[in-house]
Image: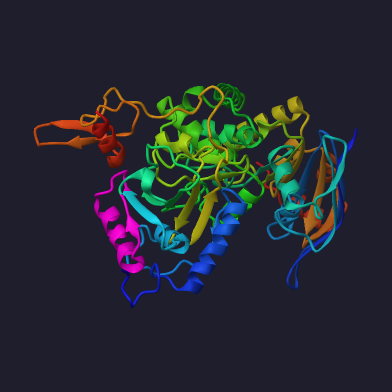
Amino acid sequence: MSSASYNFAYLSEQTKRMIRRALLKAIAIPGYQVPFASREMPMPYGWGTGGVQVTAAILVPEDVLKVIDQGADDTTNAVSLRSFFVKTAGIATTEATAEATVIQTRHRIPEAPLTENQILVFQVPIPEPLRFLEPRETETRKMHALEEYGVMHVKLYEDIAKLGQVATTYAYPAKVAGRYVFDPSPIPKFDNPKLDHNPALQLFGAGREKRVYAIPPYTSVQSLDFEDHPFEIQKWDHTCALCGSDDSFLDEIITDDKGGHMFVCSDTDHCRATQEQK
Amino acid sequence: MKKLLSVQQLSKFFGEQLACDDIGFDLYEGEVLAIVGESGSGKTTLLRCLAGLLPPNHGRILYHGKDGRQVDIVLASEAVRRNLLRTEWGFVHQDARDGLRMGVSAGANIGERLMAIGDRHYGHIRSSAEQWLGRVDIPISRIDDSPWTYSGGMRQRLQISRNLVTAPRLMLMDEPTGGLDVSVQARLLDLMRGLVRDLGLAVILVTHDLAVARLLSSRMIVMQNGRVVEQGLTDQILEDPQQPYSQLLVSSVLQV
């Protein structure tokens, strides 16, 4: 049961309505960053205050919540946020991707395919893909409005010129529905193809920057690239040391101080499910 | 010759302060027009109005586009102005740091306009950048270096090439030789003369340096206190200035 002193999911009903209005606008204009009146949350900025507010605004008592951090259900951030919603909303939680109706995530999209009945909520540190190229907010808004995205390719050009390939491996910019270029939050570019035509609704919340944006179900998301240097995802020479999976995103885990290491799935639920199948 | 730009009764105030008053002139294709005058005479304000960077209080700036249409820069939407500025126009700042993207390599600086108009082929962008570096006398080996590592003269040449890559028809230049020593200036002027001739560029050149105006321009406008005091052929004005202010300006050039 939720603690009696909290409103359902911590935020006041009025706040949730405000966030829902922003989310509706975000869904209506895929990839467009909608400003919203981000609240102070009982956790520091950078811990997912944007994602938490979005999740709080969309939760209903019947929801089953999954929270992942770097793909794992058992890391500090994931455990803390899950217990936050257990305490303030009293909802059911799960670690199984297929059972969840709302999945709040930091850094990963689950390996298991999502369905139309699921909502994926991303925690976003810096929503503006143009930020490191153009520091002025007034100017970046204008650039979005006028679709002046050439400068995004300048960054990719620099990578190829200096390193022979596009070295951006996370927060890889992509174009939503052929219009807005957006920052998919710090997910690895490995996950970019999963954004494209995903049956689940994908919501993005940036608490400190006070922005939400969305990718509606079945919306095209095209990662930026050059004709002669097409977009590619990471590949590994290894398979997961625990489950043997060869198609999931692998983390390198240091096992001792003598140089021992192993590669394991970053998605803990996917790893467990694969092990159970065997 | 076809008319490219027509400026009519252009005025700009900053509050009560008059910066440009009732300016009017025409510019034809391939022509280099110098705007000269002392500091504070309104030259740069005029140039910024022409580029659409400042809204004038009064007047019209009619541009005859590549597609044959006439655009009033004052009334045009920001989208149209910004599009013109990165396709058919170029703007060369006095301080190259204002016109360059200092955080990225020289090659990316040249390629930016191509990418802005939709070029998505790395190999093509790269070869254009190499070609343009060559044309402005920068060694191709410096293509991946940051403009921070460039000398003042090289930065200015890089800024010019970065503007020329989309084959603009009109270049607006604000004191392009300012702050450069005389030998570097001479080299830059030589280069600009060659480019203007080869590419058939029209240029509006703002300068306080009459020697630069004489070398590059065919026509000249003399400004004082926001007003045009004299306009005509460059040689005519420099050899035989009619107005007292122009006479003063010409006679105050140091003879070496």
Is any atom of residue B211 visible in this view? no
Residue beneath the point at 13% across and 31% down: A260
Q: Position of residue A212 (x, y in %)?
A: 51, 57
Q: How is the image coloured?
A: rainbow
Image quarter (top left, top right, bottom left or bottom right) of the C terminus of chain A: top left
Please state the horizontal and vertical placement of residue A186, each as a whole percent of the image. Answer: 40, 45
Q: Is residue A274 above or below residue A186?
A: above
B74 vs A149, left or right, is: right
Looking at the image, which is closer to me, B86 or B162? B86
**Residue B151 position (above or below residue A164):** below
Q: Measured from the top left, where is residue B196 in percent x and y? A: 74, 31
Direction from residue A187 to residue B50 in the image, left or right: right
A178 within the magenta span: no
Quadrant the N terminus of chain A occupies? bottom left
Query: Between A146 and B93, which is closer to the camera in this rendering?
Result: A146
Q: Could you tell me which residue is drawn at 30 percent across and 67 percent down?
A: A87
* Vertical arrangement, residue B128 with respect to residue B43, above or below: above
- Residue drawn at x 82%, y 35% is B66
Residue A89 included in the magenta stretch of the image: yes
* Residue lying at 29% horizontally and 22% vertically, measured from the top left: A237
Please identify the quarter of the rendering in which residue B135 is found.
top right
Residue A170 appearing in the image: yes
- Residue A128: give x, y in percent of width and height: 50, 51
Magenta segment: A69-94
Q: Residue furthest bottom?
A: A5
Q: Looking at the image, which is closer to me, B111 or B230?
A: B111
